[in-house]
Amino acid sequence: MRPGDEFAGRYVLKEVIGAGRGGDVWLAHDTVVGQDVALKPGQVEGDRETAVRRLLGEPRALAKFRDHPHVVTLFDVVTVPSDGDTAGDVGETYWFVMEYVPGGGLDRQPPMSPERVARIGAQLADALAALHEAGIVHCDLKPANVGLTRRGAAKLLDFGAAYRAGGSETITANGPYSFTPDYAAPELARGNVPRPASDVFCLAATLYALVTGSPPRGGEPGAEGDGADGDGAGAAGEDRDRLTYWKAEQGVVEMDAEAVGPLLPVLGAMLQRDPRQRPEAAEAGRLLAAVAEHGAPDPDGRPAAPGGGRSRWRRRALFATAALGVGAAIVLSLVTVPGNGDEQDGGGNDRRGSAGRQLPKDTSNGGTRALIGDPRTADVCALADPDALHRFGESEVDVDYGNFDRCDVLVHPDDRSRIDVSVQLRRGSPPEASDPVRTIGGIAVREAPSKKGECGLLLSRDTAGGGTGSGRTGGDMFVGVRVDVGHGTVAGGAAALCAVADTAARSAAEVLNRGPLPRRSPPYPAASLAWRSACALLDAEALSVVPGIKADVPEAGVADWDCEWFSDVDDLEAEIAFFRDEPKSARDGRVVRLSGYDAVVEPEGNGEDTCTVFVPYREYGGRDAETAVEMLRLHVGGQRPIGELCHLTTELAASAAAELRAR
């Protein structure tokens, strides 16, 4: 077949505009009605009865929606014999005569604004609602299967992977059903029966890609593969395929909250790992239409910052179903076992553990204590120097996020991207197998284990160079630098992130080389949780609600600001920690009243198979007159239903809140 050929007595071929499972898709001109059409082939091979039934499933499905404005229209089906065969023999070709959608799929289009994508999403959701009412699940919604007419209306394309819900008949010729892992709902990737909620997930993943240019599983634009027969390019492609399949099976998504803006709450609901928690297509369409018409506030209810930027608080608004991540953040962790050798904290609180036994004393050697001192009075932000990082972009200190053991610097390379730098005090020592790669004065620098897209460094006393401290004992300190991107993209990729990590590490090393860490000025107020023990807020009786929990073996963090317990039953774990952030509200989760506190319950708030409860304790004026809150953060994780995990977490939170109120 060549351009200019006449096909089936009425269609003049123009050019190849795509490729389908059956071969090249042609643009042709219908000389009878005077309009352009798309000709899509489908080969009948193998067992004819089965092949024809599967092949005709797509046009029969499309025929049900001939009048729907957002489903591509099927005009006719033409059968022609393949070369050397006669009509009706094995090898004949069916040609679907379909509406021509200029430009084909949207996988080759540049990123669009969230509002425009919301309009497209509302139209596609309307199409999906019609499919679901007719008992059909599309299964393979992705940018390549979405087109736009000349008037800008979205059209749902390619029903070749569709599945008849409630029955055993499939439309796809590639097995029970097919999907694209970058966009597939987890139940599809796991081989479960497709359901209408699966399409809702795929739609959300598609809309995310239309805004950002890549799917929410970190794939590259245009790297879509077919779940049934796609293959990667060499070892790198195979590795990517395996990782993408794993992410699909686990329901992992990595969303850039800044990029999707007002779409975040809607996409978050649609991308829930549990299909029962996703809105139906019709409801998703209403939510998307509202965003398209009115926009929406940020998920936390705060307006956008002046000049079109985002408030610094917005760096925390991330969503994930199985793993929470948005590219990268520089995390500079100062890990140590600090202490003053007594059994009380800086506020006079008893340091006895939750089970009534004394928690292990801090056993820092003299060198560590000389550098860090009492962590409750140490100025951790002295280790995070925004001026040192200014060459990478505008930098500002964020002192009101996370536990009291950290301080963050936000670096803005440009208006659309951000890098986070966090300095954190922790108990521990560098890994024994990690050898220094360089020294800065008396500080040894080691590479830290890092995830893909990160760069990590560890800083500790250089014992080989004559520094004090063993460098291999639990009483020594070390500093960890982990680098990733808060949102957007950073020019230079991993090399640029490692350059930032190196600068942050050098800055911290210079502070440590100068001597003792400066003290906070002013110190934490007497009412602050910084003077309290999080571990002491849960005793053995309170912890007994978690099956099999080992209440007498806590893993305590610096100054007992966090404590974690583990169980041999269903991999259960429980943690309590102090936390600082902007105020939580009903936008973040379900509000419950616990001992006079308005706590917020967030299912999967700490990742897949977890539930988190935030108990606000003390509001205070943070940086730039923003309101910040000291709170308790409790989470329970494990192999139990999410409802049960939230019940256990709420029970622990109620006990901790009552103890907090009593003291």
Image (cartoon, grey):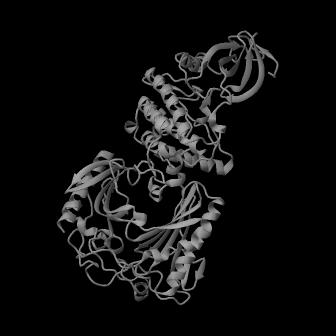
Residue 580 x/y as whole percent: 36, 63
Judge left or right: residue 425 versus residue 205. Answer: left
Q: Could you say which quadrant of the image residue 116 lies in?
A: top right
Write the residue at 39% across / 61% down.
626
Q: Which residue is most to the bottom?
A: 466
| Quadrant in which the C terminus appears | bottom left
The answer to whether residue 44 shows anywhere in this view is no
Is residue 174 at least partly visible in the picture? yes
- The answer to whether 189 is drawn above or below residue 467 in the figure is above
Residue 601 to residue 371: above or below: above
For the point 53% across and 26% down, the residue is: 162
Check the picture and name the quadrant holding the N terminus. top right
Asked which quadrant contains residue 213, the reply is: top right
Q: Is residue 501 left or right of residue 303?
A: right
Give the side of residue 259 with respect to residue 473, left or right: right
The residue nearer to you, when weighing 178 against 109, is 109
The picture places residue 661, in percent across and down from the top left corner, at 19, 64
On the image, the x and y values in percent for residue 295 come to 47, 40
